[in-house]
Image: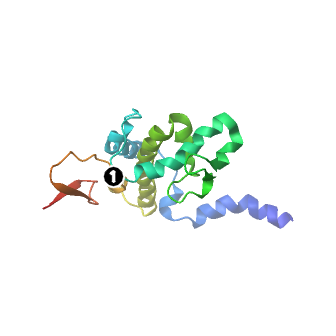
């Protein structure tokens, strides 16, 4: 039993010794500035979704399908246990077996409870962009890349996760193709 406690006590230092060189250092003010740049970039790219007007919906056909499952969290403050049953469509079904939405994701739960289903979904999209950028930044740091390369990688990954720019109305049929370079949207018109 004493050996187990000794191993548990020494575990953090053993993990630090086995960690790659890019993971051993602590976060400095420069790292926090890089993370702030990545988060601000994600907010700028997703600025169309930061409108908290519930009458403004993101462009796309799948938004209402995914959004339908998030309405179940509006029942939590009202009746508690009834959040387990989604009775909003076709007589109801168990709330946590929905295949289209991400009902149990912590970001979805928190944003839905704070801002409601529609605005919470828009904030969730921007938070997902920021998280994708932060994870890419961490990967670049673990690989030992420099500051500019880390911010570049994180910004490009965070911006290319989704097409967040609302397309202008066009008379012609158009499709939007996202590129991997800084989330630039290239429009391809079909005739």
Is residue 4 found left or right of 128 in the rendered image? right
Residue 32 x/y as whole percent: 44, 43
Which quarter of the rendering shows the N terminus? bottom right
Task: Find the residue positioned furthest to the right.
Answer: 1
Q: Is residue 107 visible?
A: no
Residue at 23% across, 58% down: 175
Residue at 53% across, 49% down: 69
Q: Mark 1 falls on what kind of element? A: helix
Which of these two is toward me, 172 or 152? 172
Task: Find the residue positioned furthest to the top.
Answer: 53
Q: How is the image coloured?
A: rainbow
Q: Residues within 10 Å of mark 1 (few under 14, many from 20)?
A: many
Task: Find the residue positioned furthest to the front.
Answer: 91
Which quarter of the rendering shows the C terminus? bottom left
Residue 31 against residue 79 in the figure, above or below:
below
Residue 38 x/y as whole percent: 38, 47
Q: Is residue 126 visible?
A: yes
Which of these two is toward me, 103 or 180? 103
Residue 110 against residue 159 in the figure, above or below:
above
Q: Quadrant of residue 77?
A: top right
Residue at 65% across, 60% down: 13
Pointer 1: what residue?
159
How many marks do you count on the picture?
1
Residue 103 x/y as whole percent: 56, 51
Residue 61 x/y as whole percent: 36, 53
Is residue 118 found left or right of 180 in the rendered image? right
Is residue 115 found left or right of 13 in the rendered image? left
């Amino acid at each position: 039993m004493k050996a187990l406690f000794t191993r548990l006590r020494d575990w953090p230092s053993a993990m630090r010794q086995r960690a790659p060189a890019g993971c051993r250092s602590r976060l400095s003010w420069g790292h926090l500035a890089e993370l702030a740049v990545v988060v601000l970039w994600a907010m700028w790219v997703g600025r169309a979704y930061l409108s908290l007007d519930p009458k403004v919906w993101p462009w796309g056909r799948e938004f209402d399908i995914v959004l339908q499952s998030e309405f179940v969290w509006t029942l939590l403050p009202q009746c508690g246990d009834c959040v387990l049953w989604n009775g909003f469509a076709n007589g109801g079904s168990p709330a946590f077996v929905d295949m289209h939405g991400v009902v149990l994701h912590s970001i979805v739960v928190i944003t839905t409870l704070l801002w409601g289903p529609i605005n919470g979904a828009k904030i969730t999209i921007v938070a997902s962009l920021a998280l994708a950028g932060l994870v890419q930044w961490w990967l670049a740091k673990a690989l030992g890349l420099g500051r500019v390369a880390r911010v570049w990688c994180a910004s490009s990954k965070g911006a290319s996760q989704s097409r967040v720019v609302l397309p202008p109305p066009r008379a012609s049929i158009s499709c939007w193709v996202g590129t991997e370079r800084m989330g630039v949207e290239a429009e391809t018109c079909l005739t």
